[in-house]
């Protein structure tokens, strides 16, 4: 599963790099299939990218709005870069959004008591 997460991050990074829409996840088909879940930081970066696209805001525009260098924006969209969560939150505020945290069970995983 670790390789699957890495592969998913790599694929989504290519979508971001090529300024493409992120495809919506499909449904898990079959009982032996397992859902690949992004780490929270990568998920936050993907959602920020989607917000930028939906608002028509480019990286350079957001960087100017925030008073940041464009390279800082690049790192905040790089799914493999270990950004700090507070930086992602600040960039979301630049889009008039906030980061909300939600705890969920993994799908298709039995919980033991």
Image (cartoon, rainbow, N blue to C red):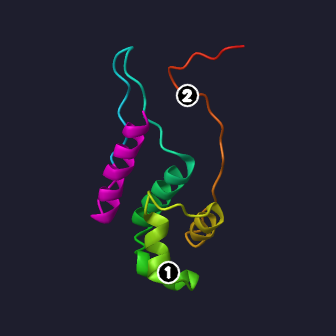
Q: Give the position of the N terminus as an image quadrant.
A: top left
Image position of 108 with respect to 48: above or below: above
Q: Is residue 6 magenta?
A: yes
* Span shown in magenta: 1-22
Question: Badge 1 local density, few (<14 within 10 Å), some, or many (20+)?
Answer: some
Quadrant of residue 85 in the image? bottom right
Q: Report the residue at 50% width, 80% height from top.
A: 63
- For mark 1, give the secondary structure: helix
> Along the line of sight, which residue is nearer the eye, 79 or 54?
79
Residue in the foreground of this view, choosing between 34 and 61: 34
Q: Which residue is mark 1?
A: 63
Q: Residue 61: where, in percent of width, then height?
A: 45, 81
Q: In the rendered view, tell whether residue 6 sits above or below residue 83.
A: above
- Quarter-of-image position of residue 59: bottom left
Q: CA distance from mark 1 to mark 2?
A: 35 Å
**Magenta stretch mostly in which secondary structure?**
helix
* Quadrant where the image shows the C terminus: top right
34 left or right of 101 in image? left
Q: Is residue 37 above or below residue 15?
A: above
Residue 13 included in the magenta stretch of the image:
yes
Q: Residue furthest front?
A: 3
Dot 2 falls on a residue whose secondary structure is loop
> Residue 70 appears in which quarter of the rendering?
bottom left
> Which disc is residue 106 wearing?
2
Q: Residues within 10 Å of mark 2 (few under 14, many from 20)?
A: few
Q: Residue at x 57, y 70 (%)?
A: 91
């Amino acid at each position: 599963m670790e390789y699957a997460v890495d592969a998913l991050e790599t694929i989504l990074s290519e979508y971001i790099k090529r300024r493409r829409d992120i495809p919506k996840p499909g449904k898990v088909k079959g009982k032996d299939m397992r859902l690949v879940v992004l780490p929270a930081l990568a998920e936050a970066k993907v959602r920020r990218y989607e917000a930028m696209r939906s608002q028509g805001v480019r990286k350079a525009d957001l960087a100017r709005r925030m008073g940041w260098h464009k390279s800082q924006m690049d790192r905040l969209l790089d799914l493999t870069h270990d950004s700090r969560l507070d930086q992602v939150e600040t960039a979301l505020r630049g889009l008039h959004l906030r980061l909300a945290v939600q705890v969920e069970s993994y799908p298709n995983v039995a919980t033991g008591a």
